[in-house]
Image (cartoon, rainbow, N blue to C red):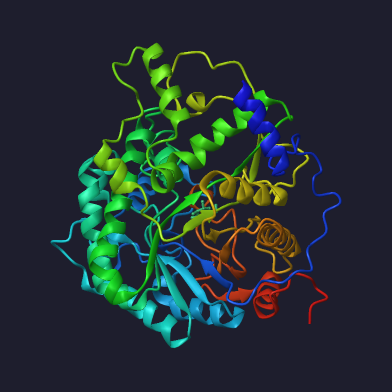
Amino acid sequence: MRILYIFAIFATFLDLSLGDGDDENVDYQITDKTYPEGFVFGVATASYQIEGGWNEDGKGEQIWDTWIHNNPGIVADGSTGDVASDSYHKYKEDVACMKEVGVQYYRLSISWARILPTGRIDKVNQAGVNYYLNVLKELKANGIEAMVTLYHWDLPTALQDIGGWTNPEIVEVFADFARLSYGLFGDYVQTWVTINEPKQICHGGYANAGYAPGIDSKGVGEYSCARNILLAHARGWHIYDQEFRSKQNGRITIVIDSDWYEPTNYTPEDEQAAETKRQFVFGMYANPVFIGNWPQVMIDRVADRSAKEGFNSSRLPAFSDEEISLIKGTYDFLALNHYTTYMVGAADEPAIGSPSWELDAGGNVYQKDTWEQAAIGWFRVVPWGFGKLLKWIKATYGDLEIVITENGVSDRTGTLEDDHRINYIRSYMSHMLDAMYEDNIKITGYTLWSIIDNFEWTQGFNAKLGIYYINMTDPERPRVAKKSSKYYAKVIETGCLLDSCA
Ligand code: BGC
């Protein structure tokens, strides 16, 4: 308890926990400060969300193809990613959009099954390799750097058939895929991301059946998935570090997503509940990489609840000492995706019954109805949460270089007059600038999701996040600039968020 009080005082001093979360934006002024020289701006996409060409030129099937084809009702508007934004054929138009906006880099992902149809390196699909080489050459010709994610959720189905991310076999299979990719593409890639958002992969895919492969194994599946993901990431990082870094001079890390979890009130109990939730969300993936091992609060809580549930060992599988050292330090910078905020209040310890990560984390987690809502249900616009998350990361993990690898907002219509998106970008980026100037947080890059409207997973085409509109019923899929693309272009040119900037 004493420690909690000390933390609360410390947190207040750091302005981490203002409590309550109400109307924190009322008096907020967008900063007139500008992004420093050398700060870089990019845009992001992911293979399945934009490419289409789902079975073209020898591509293998991946879990989202399989899951959606087998469960037609699973996507909100009944659509699929079979064609998506058709970037398999229209990547040059995507690059032209980026050129128009003036971004310094493009974050894209490789479809594992496009280059390795079975997921394994014994059969390489040359047409798939050529596709990515063409994209990378087009970027280079236009002076745009490449940030390439190896895994953005599209696991070859053949690998899911052997258990996917819950089978330890995946670690070395991923390592092979990583090594092959560095060798094939590394001369064109300035920054590598091993894996995008392990939380979404493990919790959506293997615990609550919200994402492909649609497995419901709550309280067990996400932990074994997380363990293998972290080991696979670490192997991928070391292979680059030892075999490619000196020749290719790139950087490599893992992308971790986190919402901000604000305590309901200033009380030590609410602060503890919020901090526990942060550890179960961000710490679950960040601790092993930046500190070593799972967060202690996770080790303790999952072991305790597992024992009460009658398990013979903790549902959170332990890392050996060798595994802890293998994973620890496998980053060149901290890559963060952030979209929204939740409130967390203290709650009674959840009853023992069906195991789940949510119950392991505890707390009363909710969003406020007063917060503006975007097209996706969980998605509310809470710019101040971004600043608090950044401060908490610095206070918890130290003075690391941070690159924002995703941030952006959805709507349903894809309107070209997307002032709400400009407001979102402006206010989130303003809180980020405050964190840089007022708290000396070393943020060196910002990546907007997304350059074009695309296939938003189980929302299909119902949620549009692009700064270029695509009419998904038009076979030509023309890219049309939204107002937000002009705004982002101006921010990149001037480093300034205000309309009054020259
Ligand atoms: C994912 C993207 C997704 C975005 C918006 C992130 O979690 O990495 O693939 O489109 O959120 O929902």
455 or 132: nearer the viewer: 132
- Res. 447 visible in picture: no
320 or 104: nearer the viewer: 320
Q: Is residue 38 left or right of residue 227?
A: right
Q: Quadrant of residue 88?
A: bottom left
| Residue 116 screen position, x and y as percent | 23, 62
Q: The N terminus lies in which quarter of the figure?
A: top right
Say which residue appears at 55% left-offset and 31% top-offset. 276
Say which residue appears at 27% left-offset and 45% top-offset. 160
| Residue 287 screen position, x and y as percent | 44, 42
Q: Residue furthest right?
A: 27
Q: Is residue 338 left or right of residue 458?
A: right
Say which residue appears at 45% left-offset and 14% top-offset. 353
| Residue 50 screen position, x and y as percent | 46, 65
Q: The C terminus lies in which quarter of the figure?
A: bottom right
Say which residue appears at 45% left-offset and 23% top-offset. 301
Residue 415, placed above or below residue 118: below
Residue 144, placed above or below residue 370: below
| Residue 107 screen position, x and y as percent | 47, 67
